[in-house]
Amino acid sequence: MTLPAGFTDLEPFVDDWALPTRAQRYEARLAKPYDDLVTFYDAIAPRAEEAIAYLNGLDINALPDEATRLLHLLYSMILVSYAVNVFKQNRILDSGAAFFDMVAEPVP
């Protein structure tokens, strides 16, 4: 699966992190080794502003598939950022099996 021109360096992360739902992204965060989260975050975080600027130039209701994948990578970056920058681990301490099902999430 490809990403828009200019973001092809992030393509190695597409299969694991360009996930369409928050539940899938959270499951990936919990399932992957912490070092994988750090590697992903360190690769995408410096590109986030550029990716946002690119996506802002498109119609959110008619994103091409490659742009949708880039958006999903940004969503994963946000979810992973808490683990990397705050908790320094995949799971929040003392959270047990707690999980909130979201009724709605950003589209696409």
Image (spheres, helix red, strand yellow):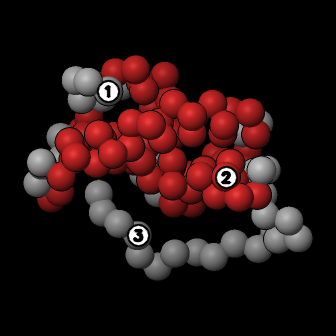
Q: Relative to residue 53, is residue 43 drawn left or right? A: right
For the point 73% across and 44% down, the residue is 31
Q: Which mark is residue 105?
A: 3
Q: Relative to residue 102, is residue 100 drawn left or right? A: right
User: Amino acid under label 1?
Assistant: Phe
Graded by Cα atoms within 10 Å as few (under 14), some (14 to 19) or many (20 or more), the crowding at tag 3 reads few
Q: Earlier in the sequence, mark 3 or mark 1?
A: 1
User: Can you say whether 82 is above or below 13 in the image?
Assistant: below
Which of labels 1 and 2 is toward the front? Answer: 2
**CB under 8 Å between discs 1 and 2:** no
Q: Secondary structure at mark 1?
A: loop
Q: Which mark is residue 85?
A: 2
Viewer-proximal residue among 71 and 101: 71
For the point 76% across and 58% down, the residue is 87
Graded by Cα atoms within 10 Å as few (under 14), some (14 to 19) or many (20 or more), the crowding at tag 1 reads some
Q: Locate residue 107, reporting x and y percent.
A: 30, 63
Q: Which residue is mark 1?
A: 7
Q: Locate residue 96, reporting x and y percent.
A: 86, 69
Q: Earlier in the sequence, mark 2 or mark 3?
A: 2
User: Amino acid under label 2?
Assistant: Asn
Image quadrant of residue 39? top right
For the point 52% across and 75% down, the residue is 102
Q: Relative to residue 39, is residue 97 drawn left or right? A: right
